[in-house]
Image (cartoon, rainbow, N blue to C red):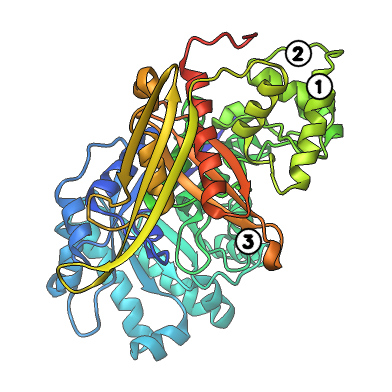
Amino acid sequence: MTTEKLYIYDTTLRDGQQTQGVQFSTDEKVMIARALDDLGVDYIEGGWPGANPTDNAFFAALPKTKATITAFGMTKRAGRSAENDDVLAAVLNAGTSSVCLVGKTHDFHVETALGISLAENIDAIRLSIAHIVAQGREAIFDAEHFFDGYKSNPAFALESLKAALGAGARWLVLCDTNGGALPREIYEIVSEVIASGIPGKNLGIHTHNDTENAVANTLMAVDAGVRHIQGTLNGLGERCGNANLTSLIPTLLLKEPYAGRFETGVSPHSLTGLTRLSGLLDDILNRVPARQAAYVGGSAFAHKAGLHASAILKDPTTYEHVDPSVVGNARLIPMSNQAGQSNLRKRLKEAGLSVAKDNPALGRILEVIKQREALGYSYDTAQASFELLARKELDQLPRFFEVKRYRVSVERRKNKYNEMVSLSEAVVVVKVGDEKKLSVSESLDETGSDRGPVNALAKALAKDLGAYQSMIDDVRLVDFKVRITQGGTEAVTRVVIDSEDSQGRRWATVGVSANIVDASFEALIEAFQWKLIRDTAFDHAGA
């Protein structure tokens, strides 16, 4: 069967930047653009030239990409010609071969928001697109509020599209700007647009996720005939976000009927980098990755129940809709008090521990897990702590160092600017071999800001571990989660710490105590122990 091309247009750097709390630097924009290009998207919307200094700097130093970098702007303003509109000129001055202009297609917005006649708006669309085309650029028209506009006044909405198409626009992108349209509406309206004489090969779709339907709406638009898809990595975007390309791209490549009908610029090889790309964006934004994210989430291929894990061992397709490796993810068998020996042996095998079915340690490990989870521990997400627990019961836990004591203090005082500031200081005494080592560290970061007592403890613990020091120098704490597991005066605190190293390995450890600092320090110690196990020549098959 002959396949059709679907064009993927990423707007992470522009529409994604409208997410509350998100602001990319120029260097971060360049980094993301290169990563998107490696993935294989067709278009990368870089931002709005003239709107802010960061976007200006990005367009002044565009990275070389196979993807088409696109500048975003709006149609000319009323009362000005396209040639004399300085906002439109700034977009053209970015020098990109492709330009996307947003214009009104909802009569309510034209008359109320712009305060002009419908005829004037049609002229603005036609003249602006014609001006882009006359400059030798590819023109893309973003039909703002199209679906709401079509429901209000279909004749005007269609006239807006035909004005852009007649002026030479390559793509007419139908935007569900408010995110309120539902899948059936999307399919029916796109079908009617094509029936009106506008070819599907010129149509695109841009959806928002305000009803949690952005991905479904995009797929319905493809089913109806559009061939250009807009979205963002990890579903970034204003309000509830945009269509999530991290979900859409693997669906298009791996699921029928899309996989058999269409081709995209994303190859099976580049698709294996999708999970890492999703994580890269979260790292740049200093965000905790969404564990339940489709395809790329840490729990996307996690199997907790013993019945599921037993079936997975026989045939992964029993509980997995795709092979996790095709998107760069991995299967996870969490450990909890719901687990059976199938989960346990599978997880031990993944940790490099081959244990016979009749080994009595298996029963001990499960019993210890149940006892400790009753105290507040959780091994569902703290896989590294589970491995250390199992190694201890199997007598396969090496003793790299021993913490003899620690002390942490928090001081509140005025600085030289007469401002009240906090300063945390930690002292840690460890025994490495026969040698005791005392380390002291403060919690100030490079800006002089206090990062708190746990940060001070982490720095002190990592300061001098003797022969093992070089192995833990690249450990970075990337997330810190606190949960109170019991209320009242007998509250128990659970701390889960996510760590990462320069090899891209990421692991989680857990600590529990009535004292949040104790719980944190327990998780920190185990984070370093797990790292040392991975980086030493220790025999994983036995001590």
Nearest the eye: 7 or 362: 362
Residue displayed at 21% across by 65% down: 52
Residue 170: mark: none
Rendered location of residue 176, percent (x, y): 52, 68
**Which badge, 1 or 2, comes first in the chain's sequence?**
2
Residue displayed at 17% across by 56% down: 135
Residue 213: mark: 3
Q: Are the residues at dot 3 and dot 2 in contact (C-beta closer than 8 Å)?
A: no
Q: Amino acid at mark 3?
A: Asn
Q: CA distance from mark 3 to mark 2?
A: 46 Å
For residue 539, above or below residue 59: above
Disc 1 secondary structure class: helix
Disc 3 secondary structure class: loop
For residue 204, above or below residue 81: above
Q: Amino acid at mark 2?
A: Val
Q: Are the residues at dot 1 and dot 2 in contact (C-beta closer than 8 Å)?
A: yes
For residue 191, above or below residue 425: below
Callout 1 crowding tier (Cα within 10 Å): few <14, some 14–19, many ≥20: many
Rendered location of residue 531, percent (x, y): 48, 26
Residue at which label 2 appears: 355
Place residue 488 in its image quadrant.
bottom right
**Discs 3/2, front:** 2
Disc 2 secondary structure class: loop
> Is 316 left or right of 146, judged from the image as shown?
right
Quarter of the image containing the C terminus? top right
Rendered location of residue 200, percent (x, y): 52, 53
Q: Amino acid at mark 1?
A: Leu
Residue displayed at 27% across by 58% down: 449
Residue 362: mark: 1
Q: CA distance from mark 1 to mark 2?
A: 8 Å
Q: CA distance from mark 1 to mark 3?
A: 45 Å
Total numbered labels: 3
